[in-house]
Amino acid sequence: MTEAVEGAVENTEYDVVVIGAGPVGENVADRARAAGLSTAVVESELIGGECSYWACMPSKALLRPVVARADARRVPGLSAAVQGHLDVEAVLAHRDAYASHWKDDGQAAWLDGIGADVYRGTGRLTGTGKVTVTAPDGTEHRLTAQHAVAVCTGSRAVVPDLPGIADARPWTSREATSAKEVPARLVVVGGGVVGVEMATVWQALGSEVTMLIRGTGLLPKMEPFAGELVAEALTEAGATIRTGVSATAVHRAGQDGPVTVELDNGERIEADEVLFATGRAPRTDDLGLETVDLEPGSWLTVDDSCRVEGSTWLYAVGDVNHRALLTHQGKYQARIAGAAIAARARGGPLAGDPWSPHTATADHAAVPQVVFTDPEAASVGLTLAEAEEAGHRVRAVDHDLAAVAGSGLYADGYRGRARMIVDLDREIVLGVTFVGPGIGELLHSATVAVAGEVPIQRLWHAVPAYPTISEVWLRLLETYRR
Amino acid sequence: MTEAVEGAVENTEYDVVVIGAGPVGENVADRARAAGLSTAVVESELIGGECSYWACMPSKALLRPVVARADARRVPGLSAAVQGHLDVEAVLAHRDAYASHWKDDGQAAWLDGIGADVYRGTGRLTGTGKVTVTAPDGTEHRLTAQHAVAVCTGSRAVVPDLPGIADARPWTSREATSAKEVPARLVVVGGGVVGVEMATVWQALGSEVTMLIRGTGLLPKMEPFAGELVAEALTEAGATIRTGVSATAVHRAGQDGPVTVELDNGERIEADEVLFATGRAPRTDDLGLETVDLEPGSWLTVDDSCRVEGSTWLYAVGDVNHRALLTHQGKYQARIAGAAIAARARGGPLAGDPWSPHTATADHAAVPQVVFTDPEAASVGLTLAEAEEAGHRVRAVDHDLAAVAGSGLYADGYRGRARMIVDLDREIVLGVTFVGPGIGELLHSATVAVAGEVPIQRLWHAVPAYPTISEVWLRLLETYRR
């Protein structure tokens, strides 16, 4: 398909060009290839993306030993053996292995295996269906997409523009998940998922962690009790959580000296490292969006097939469309978008109704998330506040997870809570939140119930095995029926 | 409601009389009371039943430390700390606490709290709606049930009638869950749930366990790989599993000497204790069934409201009806039967269609079970063999659980497997089996899918959170669609 044009620059035509080879881009490419579409994938960093090297994989590799030890400490007959510290070197080595030592050979081979062509370099749009890739050595490749360009460039950590911050070399999620040494003192700015997960890890590995939270609590996007229970456990583990404070300046003393964070109340906190876990921005600033009448640096608004609004050929899949900044949800969108691209390439009609194979309806109704802290916090669908704001007539049904036999058996002194949001008009479940040890895998039961719109009356027949923590479902349903 | 009759014997009238105060009887009573029906509960042993004192509670209290240690051993940074033995005394003390030290004050208080009258003694039917309770001191109470008698007497362990067995004092599930000392050598006869769970416990607590299996493998009611994976792990833990052998005789040397088990191949195995986990029989032999034209000692056949076939007033709920010998399923039946009793008492029509509030449809379609071994084995609905035998046009979709990112993060060297049985005509899931560490709480996702009859196309939108073991759902669905 290659034709010689303009000197050294090739012009290569594909059915689909994917910009960004994280899990989302990989899945779009996979679906396109499975549909028989020729596919190019452009990547400027490592194939495998943020998730593989600086997010899900390393963070969970760091968190699992911490959570497993916390669990083991609550088990009679085992607790005494695990009172000591974790083997930090073993944990970090495990993390390195799970981050593939920041090498992407395996994932490159996978893309090769599905028959996608990989272009290393920065991909920029240059017009309708056109992408120019600038390789690290300056070589340019011009790619033309017959059917679709999918932007899957993801997001990057946002660090606030504070005095001194550039010279202070703060950690973002990348440094927090890939650090080779345990800082003696770590300040974590932000109480979202990255903040609480990384505070959990480094406190357990030996850091003295101080969290600085602008608002009133942790995990503000979840039901309030999630943040409360995680804060309680983090505090018991030795971390300090300061709410209602903001960092106003950051200074590092010399090249390797300590860092000082100034707060809006005039206080100063000294630490060895400071992590800013304060949000994400779309990686769309150097993407040539201006050539297709879109705003560089903006989130890309898409319809439910993940096609950019107003475009016939441009898709934005994963974090970059701002629908749900989670790897699994981006991969879901990739499956949907891939199917939609293939259907449109065949000229066939698109099933456009909710929950169709070409409609990412779950983005609105059933986004799951597990926060791998101690306790774990997991939710799917709407919180009470979200459901009320959306105008649903709902009831929140709460239950103490500790009052379930399976919970007490799982962990001595179990603490946890569950909430189910019921749509009173449709008698279905709009959202569920579980917070407690050992509930990570339980979430998917709620995801099936919410995405499946399984009527409450039918859930009554979904019997939880005894004695598992899952029995909380029975208690929630009983409470609802009373 | 008491009226004096025949000397010292009272004749007391209730709306509902429940025989057996295990979890099933308790739940029938709870539902009856919630419907405003006067209720008597008769119990000859401990209120709380088999589950509370000699089954679920003590067995899971024994198993949790074993499984938690197995899990912790597979976690980098933690494994070295947990190579030693469990603290056996702590484990047994924990078990004692979970069995409430074999005292039922708490559960008696609960029954009192819901306003049910408790009669201690043996309840026997004496005719339509009539139950006579013989207390331990010989006092008799005659109870009359206006609307329903519910038999919830459960089942007992069956010990085969082998030469020498009575004098050998073998363990059944009761002794295996309540033993105060660790036998140096334990023979376990039978490879069902009780057999594998108790072999797991006692091997981990220090016994040298030998399992004697008549058939070809463990857990014969589950998909074949369940028994294979559990056998592999038990063997690695040091247990010996002998398949294709039967015990033909059992002898104990003297009062406290070792026990010798003779096999059908002529071999003899000496041990300190022998556990017979060889099946269950209904506790209906001393129930007065002959007075209502039923066969003493038989399982009681019921319809989907748990009413005994041919009767207008007699219900059999839980193990005793032989539909599904599991505490949670008996409790489910109790909820259904309680609702049916209440509806009939009100004279109202019964919703008799499948999955109605008065129909225990899940008994046929969605019975869940978690075996709390290392690895855990969990299933719901039909196995491939069962689905084929029932005449469904099905496909079994398998996936290696170790190939899921969340599994490897959960445990180094993860081994496990998942199978989904798809009804090809209805495109719904008829059954799911998971075997592997950490999958116990994952089962309920399958239970919701199977009981909810959620279409495969909709399950595609139930996104598993990354990176959890739940992601196996995505792999199963992808495999099915290929």
Image: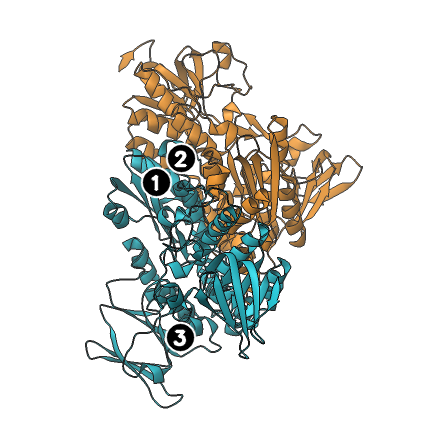
Chain colours: A orange, B cyan
Above or below, comparing residue A306 to residue B424 in the picture: above
**Can marks 1 and 2 be said to lie on one chain?**
yes
- Asked if residue A143 shows in the view, the reply is no
Q: Which mark is residue B204?
A: none
Quadrant for the C terminus of chain A in the image: top right
Q: Is residue B122 visible?
A: yes
Chain of the residue under the numbered disc 1 shown in the image:
B
Marks 1, 2: nearer the viewer: 1
Task: Farthest residue to the right: give it.
Answer: A266
Chain for disc number 3: B
In this view, which residue lies farthest toward the front? B6
Helix, strand or loop under label 1: strand
For disc 3, the marked residue is B207
Q: Nearer the viewer, residue B426 or B231?
A: B426
Q: Is residue A276 above or below residue B219?
A: above
Please rate how many residues cluster around mark 2, counting C-alpha atoms within 10 Å: few if below 14, some from 14 to 19, many from 20: many
Quadrant assignment for the N terminus of chain A: top left
Residue B182 image point, x, y percent? 44, 77
Relative to A187, does residue A112 appear above or below in the rendering? above
Determine the residue positioned at 37% across, 62% down. Answer: B193
Disc 3 is placed on an element classified as loop
N-terminal-most mark, 1 or 2: 1
Q: Is residue B102 left or right of residue B184?
A: right
Q: Nearer the viewer, residue A427 or A285?
A: A427
> Viewed as shown, does residue A267 lie left or right of B163?
right
Q: Can you give x and y, in whole percent of width and height, for residue A403 in the image?
A: 59, 55
Indicate the position of residue A400 as horizontal and vertical percent values. Answer: 61, 50
The crowd level at tag 1 (other Cα within 10 Å; few <14, some 14-19, many 20+) is: many
Q: Mark 2 — residue?
A: B459
